[in-house]
Image (cartoon, rainbow, N blue to C red):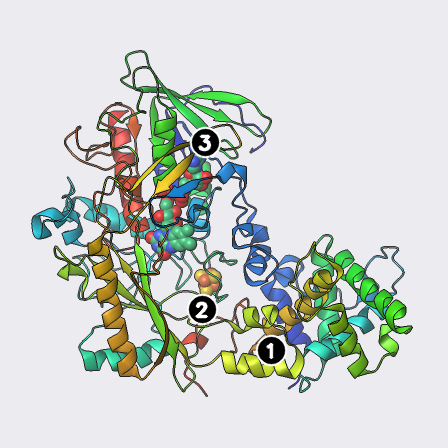
Amino acid sequence: MELTRRDALAALGSGGVVAGVGVAGLHRSLSELPDDGRDLTPERERDLLVAVARIVYPSELDGVSEFVETYVAGRAADRDGYRESVRAALVTLDERARTWRDAEFLSLDGAEREAHLRELGVDAADPDPTGTDAERIRYFVVNELLYALYTSPTGGELVGIENPQGHPGGTDTYRRGPR
Amino acid sequence: MSGDRTPSDRADVCVVGAGPAGALVAHQLGKRGYDVVVLEAGERFDPADREERMERSIRPGHGPLDVWEMGGDRDAYSSSGGIEYPLNSARVKGVGGSTLHWQGMVMRLHEIDFELASRTGVGDDWPIAYDDLRPYYAAAESELGVAGAADNPFAPPREEPFPMPAFRPSYSDSLFAEACDDLGIAMHSVPNARNSEPYDDRGECVGFGTCKPVCPSGAKYSADVHVRKAENEGVRVVDRAPVQRLVHDAAGDSVESAVYATPDGREHTQEARAFVLAAGGVEIPRLLLLSASERYPDGLANSSGLVGRCFMDHLFAGMGGTLDEPTRQNHVGFITSESHQFYDEADEDVGPFKLEFLNYAGPSPVEMALSGDEWGDDLLDTLRDGYGGHVAMGALAGQRPRERNRVTLDPSVTDDHGNPVPEIQWSLDDRTRNTLRRANEIQRDVLTELGVDIEWSVGPENTGPAFHHMGTTRMGTDPAESVVNPELRTHDLGNLWVPSSSVFVTSGAMNPTLTIAALALKAADHVDEAL
Ligand SMILES: Cc1cc2nc3c(=O)[nH]c(=O)nc-3n(C[C@H](O)[C@H](O)[C@H](O)COP(=O)(O)OP(=O)(O)OC[C@H]3O[C@@H](n4cnc5c(N)ncnc54)[C@H](O)[C@@H]3O)c2cc1C
Ligand code: SF4
């Protein structure tokens, strides 16, 4: 199944972002956002997010890269402190790869990336915006990505619900029978 | 506006609490030209933050009380008496009150609810009848904006149509309908305080599916709507201004002022000609008890000794499981069908109850995804397995009024201002247990007929409250046996009105807020007459 920019906009719409700035006002890419001085370029930030998305999203999805960047850029512009927290969690993820595996996260192959996340304990961690490293990575990276996907119509449809909770999909779908 | 928290120089009416009761009274009296001040303990939430609150409600990492920032010293309480009462899940403090969080089901009580003692020998009759409240019910429906239909054969009489058409039945309702048909159980629509079409400058429901605890679109009614309308009529609303006590005149005949605290640590005194207590069914009795004086050592308006007593809530009964086919749950966060068929069969042994057919049975995929230990394809498989065939029924049962169930003060625990916290003493009686058992029987029949693999049930052993706080300043004509009169004025103090579910004499089994709204409109008329 194909994820599109429209899905990202829908997911942003659920979060009120589109309502706030309008579609035209949305940032399309992370590089349009102000530099926070952290040692993480926007390209690398995007690549890390997309790398994690490819692990936590179902393999049948295409279009992950554009979806993720549109979503995160849109959210970052809307919420104070949000992007810093996401970036801090990404930096932690990468640093741990360097110290534990002597390699950058992005230079690991898919299986190693996933193993790294599990070794960090991110799979079993309780998401917590103010918690341990694993809990913050779970909250700001993994759950952020899962929230974006599963509140979007395409993500919902994967599971069989085209109007998932958190998405304003109108009042027709609840009356429809299975297709 | 919310910066200045000093008292108004001159006020006709001081309202305590900005939930639906307080907001409606304030709006009505403001419209009629009175100077009204509303003192609200909680804060004024920014409507622009609602999506973020919705996200908090969906995403693990935030407690359920975080959505509306409940809890902490301000909201401390004690619970005893048999069943634990989770008070802070059962209310919100803020401009809009508990309707910020509520579900928005709004039914009228039935005629039998007002004359339960005469008809069944249980509890007491109300001093007013359904017909007395009927015009106020219609007005309340138009104030809140209710979507409903005239297809309920068990509903009490009404002439006027609902302000908006009902939400149409869900797909899962149509599955239930077949089973209910075979069993001779009639299903019908549910009145919802939720826009099925644009109404009163608010848009129609867009299907976020998170109505409880937060509707980001504003399609669900919440009382901040009437706070805004009241402010447009010149009413002053002061947030973060918890009233600490009421002070009466030397003779003890009327209330002179409300003493309230502000965030800067100061106390202020608001005087007024009339006072309206609209702080909800727990804080109203608490405030009256906290206002004890030499003249009234047992608390204000408490000559009967009944302030805080006869606390009632509705009890939940439910059952659910899975079918071998998709049931299309969790698209919206409200219900579209109920059955009130068994309601009027209440007798000495079994109380009134209503049946609900849920549209949000089983887990929502988003919430499952965010709290699991898996990701990728494994997660998707789990979500597909987990979502799909769930169905569930709910029921609300009424509880009989008993003096031992009460709100009192717990002097061993104090709130952020040093006041004793409310203690909820709560227990179940046999009739209520019978009612839950009876509701479970019918639920089991329906689910069995439908072919459901029943996986869980909530009945007399594990029931919980529906968060409707009733009975703690009951209404009556005899000052020895009630706290307020049929005009909702306290027997003891001539300028103190209480529009709240706290005046309910019996609980019925319908969600209470439409009746609260009707009583608020009625109280506004009585305050107006008195002034
Ligand atoms: C989860 C949930 C779901 C619900 N669903 C439904 C439903 O579907 N249908 C229905 O009919 N009802 C429902 N209810 C109940 C409904 O919310 C209440 O009946 C209704 O809000 C009561 O209105 P009120 O104005 O009397 O009190 P509230 O709405 O509780 O408002 C009281 C206000 O007074 C303020 N206050 C308290 N003490 C003081 C003080 N000392 N000084 C100043 N201010 C004070 C509080 O901060 C609060 O804002 C639900 C409630 C909950 C919690
Ligand atoms: S489904 Fe509920 S939360 Fe969503 S718009 Fe409708 S009323 Fe609001």
Looking at the rendering, in which quadrant would you find the N terminus of chain B?
top right
Residue B428 is labelled as none
Residue extending farthest top:
B250
Can you tell which quarter of the image residue A106 is in?
Answer: bottom right
Q: Nearer the viewer, residue B238 or B359?
A: B359
Looking at the rendering, in which quadrant would you find the C terminus of chain B?
top left
Above or below residue A74? Residue B65 is above
Q: Is residue A36 left or right of residue B122?
A: right
> Which residue has dot 1 on it?
A155
> Which residue has dot 2 on it?
B332
| Residue at the image point whose x is 43% and y is 40% from the top | B78
Q: Residues within 10 Å of mark 1 (few under 14, many from 20)?
A: many
How far apart marks 2 and 3 lie (CA) works out to 44 Å
Q: Secondary structure at mark 3?
A: strand
Q: Secondary structure at mark 1?
A: helix
Residue B87 coordinates in the image, percent (x, y): 42, 46
Q: Is residue B230 visible?
A: no
Q: Which of the four quarters of the rendered structure image does ligand 1 lie in? A: top left
Q: Residues within 10 Å of mark 3 (few under 14, many from 20)?
A: few
| Residue at the image point whose x is 37% and y is 51% from the top | B467
> Which residue has dot 3 on it?
B412
Chain that bears disc 1: A
Q: Mark 2 or mark 3, which is nearer to you?
A: 3
